[in-house]
Structures are given as structure tokens and as C-alpha cells.
Amino acid sequence: MSNEPDLARRYTAELLGTFIFVFVGAGSAVATQYVGVFDPGSSLLVAALANGLGLAIGISITMGISGGALNPAVTIGLLLGKKIPAKDVIPYIIAELVGATIAGLLLMAVSPSSVGNVVHWGAPSLSSAITVAQGTLFELVMTFLLVMAVYGTIVDKRAPKIGGFGVGLIVLADVLTGGPFTGAAMNPARAMGPMIASLSFRSYWYIYWIGPVIGAALAGLIYSRVLEKSSVN
């Protein structure tokens, strides 16, 4: 008998893990607004820590069950590296989007709307200082780094046994770098969950799909075809 978790457990793990990440990450934006952390540097640090730690915990909880993708872009990156079967991709993405949306809905249920509406319930936003093309490229690069960390600290059999904390650290670093410009989503579910829950969509919502998916695909191909393959030979 196989010890691999059944499909329902894997999809449930993806839903719950994404829920944890988005509730903590988006919730940090609402919380900083509520407590009056208006200093940009402090708000950025809080967001980076919350998103990084939230993802680290979410991955660590679920990686033994579903692999801890918790991100449609990561799921696609793993597919291209032949780390998950194609039949799991659509169910994983649906589970991740549902988990993110539930997180957004619950955050709206427990938080004051006067606070949450100001920060769009934690949905990422594009700075007026950069163009849509620049924002898309920024998300692409940050997600590329994220998926390289997923492969290098979790997927690779030589990876250090540190759970999801290697990935959490790159998210923390990416948010510190790109947060002021794109919100540093690096994850279509993280971006879309609060938007779907609040029925408030950014005009540039698509950059949070295009950039992360391309970045994840490139990372998955490069790591699996070049770095991982060369280590075997």
C-alpha cells in the first residue's frame, strides 16, 4: 500500500496552507493600518516578516502532504520540472485560490471595514512610480528567485532539512526589495484572494499572473534541466 496521501488530503492541504499564508500576509496590512504604523519603513518590515513567516509555516505544515506549493505559479514551476503530475495542477490551483479567497473573506469578517478598505484588504498594489511592464518584470524576477529557493531548499534531494523557512526567507527579502513597487505578491492566489473576497479588482490584476507564472516556469526549467541535472552526471 502506498504511503502517499490521497488526492482529497493533498488538495485540502493546499487550501489550508494557502489560507494560512494569505490570512497572515494580507492581515498584516490591515493590522498595521489599524495600529497606526504609517512609517513606510516600519510597514514594509512588518509586511515582509508576516508574509515570509506565514509562508514558512504554511509550507512546513503541508510539505509532507501536498508538497507545500501554496501558489499557482509555484505549482506550474514544479510541473515544468516534472515534480508534480499534470493531473494535479488544475486542482492544486483551484484549491490555492479557494484558500486565498476564504482567507480574504474571513479577514473581512473579523476586521473593521473602515481599516481594511483603506489597504484594499491586503491586496498588492502597483506603485505609480513604475509602469505596468516594469511591475510585471519585477514580479517575474521575484518569483523566479522564490521558485529557485523552492527547488534549492525543498525539492532537491540534497536540500537542507529546514522545512519552509528557506522559502520564507526569500519572500521576506523579496518583499523588502519589491514591496514598495508591486506589493511583492509573487503568487497569483496571494494577489487574487483579497480582490475576489472584496470584489475589488485592480485594473492591472493580470500582472500578478503573467509575471509570477513566467518567472516560476523559467526557474523550474533552469533548475531541473541545468542545476539538478548537472549534479546527477
Image: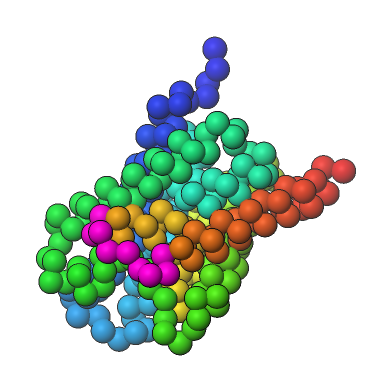
Q: Position of residue 190 (x, y in %)?
A: 39, 57
Q: Position of residue 215 (x, y in %)?
A: 61, 60
Is residue 38 in view from this perspective?
yes
* In the displayed structure image, the side of residue 140 where residue 82 appears, left or right: right
Q: Is residue 119 above or below residue 3?
A: below
State the quadrant of the N terminus. top right
Kindly indicate the quadrant of the structure image that contains residue 196. bottom left
Q: Is residue 1 above or below residue 129?
A: above
* In the displayed structure image, the side of residue 142 where residue 122 appears, left or right: left
Q: Is residue 211 above or below residue 109?
A: below
Q: Position of residue 192 (x, y in %)?
A: 37, 57
Say which residue appears at 13% left-offset and 66% top-offset.
Answer: 113
Say which residue appears at 16% left-offset and 71% top-offset.
Answer: 115
Say which residue appears at 41% left-offset and 65% top-offset.
Answer: 205
Is residue 49 in view from this perspective?
no
Q: Which residues are magenta?
A: 197-205
Say which residue appears at 23% left-offset and 59% top-offset.
Answer: 198
Kindly indicate the quadrant of the structure image that contains residue 144. bottom right
